[in-house]
Image (spheres, helix red, strand yellow):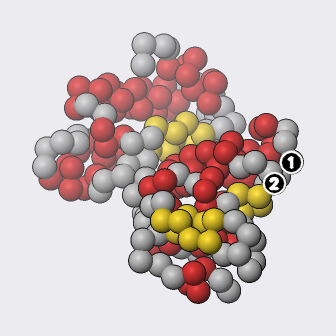
Amino acid sequence: MTRPVASVVAEADGGTVVLEEINILPVRLQSQLDSFLEDINSKRLAGNLPRDLNFRFVATSSQPLEQLVREGKFREDLYYRISVIPITMPPLRSRRDDIPLLVDHFLNNYTRVTQSPKKEVDKYALKLLTDYAWPGNVGELQNAIERACSFADDKRIRPSDLPPKITQKVEISDDENERMKHSLPIGSKLNDFIK
């Protein structure tokens, strides 16, 4: 925040400024951020910044900011400044239908960035991905897919390519269908994974 406001805002024109996990920002820096955002607004109203600047400021938090304000861990003035349009997003474990769509999105991103052939996720791996609790939400899923793409020997992502905490490393074999071993969660049955 040592750069001039006009410089930061000019770079953001036409885009989105995202401040992730604003809830962990120390109170001293919360005060500086509040002043910075007020400075942008004041300069725009005074005509020192172009009125047609087009950018969004998005702040994310993994904890409810209202509760942090009540506990004195988050500045109330900053909370009201950034809470113009609050969007509550349920955790990924509550949106299991989104997981296959997100997996496909991350596979497409990986393919584009690495310029490699797109990999597909076999039904066993997809079942594991869908059943996992995702405490790290979408970021954890993205990392799991990138890891799986890196570990996969061919164009197919199998359970053994997923992070161990997702598979819990219980080996069973499925000779009839794929003649390979799959890592499935403890207590699961193969029938749960065949549809």
Q: Which residue is mark 1?
A: 117
Residue 100 versus residue 188 in the image, above or below = above
Along the viewing direction, whichever of 167 and 92 lies nearer the viewer: 167
Residue 37 versus residue 150 in the image, above or below = above
Query: Helix, strand, or loop for circle 2?
Result: loop
> What's the CA distance linking mark 2 and mark 1?
7 Å
User: Residue 75's quadrant in the figure?
Assistant: top left
Is residue 159 at all visible to an observer of this figure? yes
Q: Left of 62 or right of it: where is 43? A: right
Task: Residue 85 in the image: state x and y as whole percent.
Answer: 46, 57
| Quadrant in which the C terminus is drawn | bottom right
Identify which residue is drawn at 77% across, 58% down.
156
Task: Residue 192 in the image: state x and y as whole percent.
Answer: 56, 84
Along the viewing direction, whichever of 163 and 177 lies nearer the viewer: 177
Q: Nearer the viewer, mark 2 or mark 1?
A: 2
Identify which residue is drawn at 31% across, 34% down.
25
- Are the two marked residues, 2 and 1, in contact with CB atoms closer than 8 angstroms? yes
> Neighbour class for label 1 at 10 Å: few (<14), some, many (≥20)?
few
Along the viewing direction, whichever of 52 and 96 lies nearer the viewer: 96
Q: Left of 100 or right of it: where is 41? A: left
Task: Residue 126 in the image: state x and y as whole percent.
Answer: 63, 68
Tell me, for residue 132, which label it has, or none: none
Task: Residue 63 in the image: state x and y as whole percent.
Answer: 31, 53
Is residue 31 at all visible to an observer of this figure? no
Identify which residue is drawn at 48% across, 60% down.
169
Residue 71 versus residue 93 in the image, above or below = above
Query: Helix, strand, or loop for circle 1?
Result: loop
User: Residue 16's quadrant in the figure?
Assistant: top right
Q: Amino acid at mark 2?
A: Lys
Q: Which residue is mark 2?
A: 155
The residue lying furthest to the left in this view is: 71
Identify which residue is drawn at 57% across, 26% down.
9
